[in-house]
Amino acid sequence: MPGDMPATDEASLPADRAAALEGVWNIVPTPFTDDGALDIASLGTLTDFVIARGVQGMTILGVLGEATRLTDEERRVVIATVVERAAGRIPICVGASAPGTDRAIGYAREAIDLGAHSVMLAPPTLARPNDAAVRAHYLAVAAATDRPIVVQDHPASSGVWMSVELLLDLAASDPRLRVIKLEDDPTPPKAGRLLAADPSLRVLGGLGGRMLIEELRRGCVGTMTGFGYPEILVDIVSRYRSGDHEGATLAFLRACPLIRFEDQAGINLPLRKRIYQRRGAIASARVRAPAPTLDAATIADLDDLLRRLDLLDT
């Protein structure tokens, strides 16, 4: 069974792998053709596009990567295609979340075998969530891998609320579990509590970047999130980390209208795909069914916003 693999020791986890999990890691959607097939060509152009925006890393098969709508073979193709196209230019993190521990272990091992730098793991969906079961899940996956695991704390998608105490316990129990993707609203106070208790943790924001400047102020090392203009987030984080806090704040406030608009619940994925399509990163904005579609008025609102922000032709 997958869970029977002996645990790797701490020395097998290169320190520079976890250290690379900072700055801006752009979470990307999975592109499909207009008829719903996996678009391998667009996987390549999307990878090149994201790398050209200056991000520190790229994450695939996240919540908005439609991973649950892919077959296992399609998952493998997505990972292999992106890793090959990136060709070491930036590291790739791969979502390995699954409802069962053995399946999550299998996804994590597959990603690592195909060249992933790290994996992202949400807690399993449980009929009655409890800390003991969540802890056992994470420790089992960590013991079966030799790469950093980004602990995804996103109750809105997992249905599991992880306390500060549980996250600290995971980090103390295994060196592979010391990077947290914090998406439990409100994120800044929780980030502050985590880092006050253990300043060596690596905490990344998310949620489309909507609390990015406040997360940086609380000690987060960056953000791992989807956004159709990742270079804007790169600029904000770069300014902040270089000491230009005022410039970072002003850049963030200028971007807030677009961050807010793109992160609308229910239509954030079709909006993001439309932006990527407009920018030439993917050929089609198709989202696999069942999925919401954008009405003409929403598309007009997006165009108006991009025009006002002078981003329409970027």
Image (spheres, grey):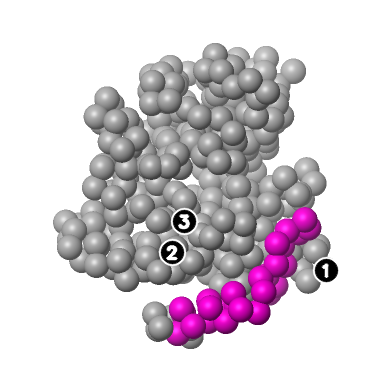
Say whether residue 82 is left or right of residue 92. Answer: right
Residue extent of the magenta highlight:
278-307
Q: Earlier in the sequence, mark 2 or mark 3?
A: 3
Q: Secondary structure at mark 1?
A: loop
State the image quarter where residue 286 is shown. Answer: bottom right
Residue at 67% x, 74% y: name it. 295
| Residue annotated with mark 1 | 35
Query: Is the Cβ of the residue at disc 2 closer than 8 Å to that at disc 3?
Result: yes
Q: Amino acid at mark 3?
A: Gly
Can see residue 40? no
Give above or below for 281 relative to 103: below
Say whether residue 231 is left or right of residue 283. Answer: left
Considering depth in this image, is 55 or 265 the residue closer to the camera? 265
Residue at 35% x, 49% y: name it. 222
- In the rendered image, residue 273, in percent from the top left (x then y), is placed at 61, 67
State the image quarter where residue 285 is shown. Answer: bottom right
> How many numbered marks, from 0 up?
3
Give above or below for 3 relative to 158: above
Is disc 1 surrounded by few (<14), some (14 to 19) or many (20+) residues within 10 Å? few
Give above or below for 95 relative to 165: below
Is disc 2 surrounded by few (<14), some (14 to 19) or many (20+) residues within 10 Å? many
Q: Earlier in the sequence, mark 3 or mark 1?
A: 1
- In the rendered image, residue 189, in percent from the top left (x then y), is placed at 31, 38
Can see residue 265? yes
Magenta includes 75? no
Q: Which mark is residue 259?
A: 2
Q: Amino acid at mark 1?
A: Asp
Marks 2/1: CA distance? 29 Å
Residue at 70% x, 72% y: name it. 284
Marks 3/1: CA distance? 28 Å
| Residue annotated with mark 3 | 208
